[in-house]
Structures are given as structure tokens and as C-alpha cells.
Amino acid sequence: MNRVQLSAAAWDTTEKAHADLAQALNFPDYYGHNLDALHDCLTELTDTQLVITDCAVASGKLEKWPGFLSVFFDSAEENPGLDIRLLP
């Protein structure tokens, strides 16, 4: 299983969060840097565990954090090849 670990501590803008996710997960160049595109790319991953640390920090700084959470949970539920772990 491919394990990718990211810290969300620096995610103070949606642009930063999308950029970090795209780079770490090797999203294609056409990645749209929005929540719909994030869902699409996450559901296409295979055999991947995504571990995001410092979620408590992101929840206090990132206005769209609830939207990201929703996408993470929905994508993991839809894609059996994706395991997402969110750590405080």
C-alpha cells in the first residue's frame, strides 16, 4: 500500500491545501484545485493510505475545512482502494 503523510498545519488557504494534496498524491496537471476535482482524483487512487496530521490546526485556520472533511469521508467510502486517516 502506498502511504502518503501530510501535515495540514500550514493549510491556511484552500489554495495551499489543494497544492499540497496535488503534489503529494501526484494528481494530474489538469487537477482543478476545487473540492469536486479533489473528490474525483481521490476516488481514482488505488491502494493508497492518506494520513493527514495536524487536523485540529487546519480546522481553526481553514474556512473550508468542513468541505475537505466531507470530501475525504465520501471519497474513502466510495473508493475501497483508499484509506484516509485524519489525526489531530
Image: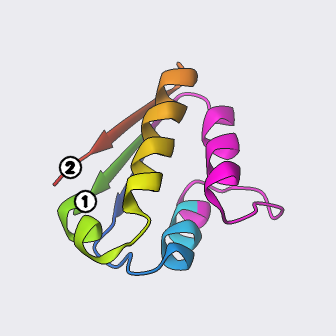
Can you give x and y, in whole percent of width and height, for residue 22 in the image? 61, 62
- Sort mark 1 into few (<14), some (14-19) or many (20+) by Cα contacts within 10 Å: some
Q: Is residue 62 above or below residue 76?
A: below
Q: How is the image coloured?
A: rainbow
Q: Quadrant of residue 42?
A: top right
Can you give x and y, in whole percent of width and height, for residue 73 in the image? 42, 35
Q: Which residue, given by chain and number where applicable, does mark 2 sit on?
A: 87
Which residue is found at the position 67% from the left and 50% from the top?
Answer: 36
Q: Is residue 65 left or right of residue 14?
A: left
Q: Single out the residue that lies furthest toward the right.
A: 30
Q: Is residue 42 magenta?
A: yes
Which residue is found at the position 67% from the left and 66% from the top?
Answer: 33
Q: Quadrant of residue 40?
A: top right
- From the viewer's side, name the closer residue of 51 and 16: 16
Q: Is residue 59 above or below residue 36?
A: below
Which residue is found at the position 29% from the left and 68% from the top?
Answer: 58
- From the viewer's side, name the closer residue of 2 and 41: 41
Query: Could you tell me how far apart the alpha carbons at marks 2 and 1 are, in whole angstroms?
Result: 6 Å
The stretch of residues the image draws in magenta is 22-49
- Sort mark 2 into few (<14), some (14-19) or many (20+) by Cα contacts within 10 Å: few
Which numbered dot is residue 33?
A: none
Can you give x and y, in whole percent of width and height, for residue 10 in the image? 34, 79
Is residue 8 in view? yes
* Contact between labelled residues 1 and 2, with CB atoms less than 8 Å apart: yes
Q: Is residue 81 left or right of residue 37?
A: left
Kind of residue at badge 1: Cys
Quarter of the image for the C terminus: give it.
Answer: bottom left
Q: Which residue, given by chain and number where applicable, does mark 1 sit on?
A: 55
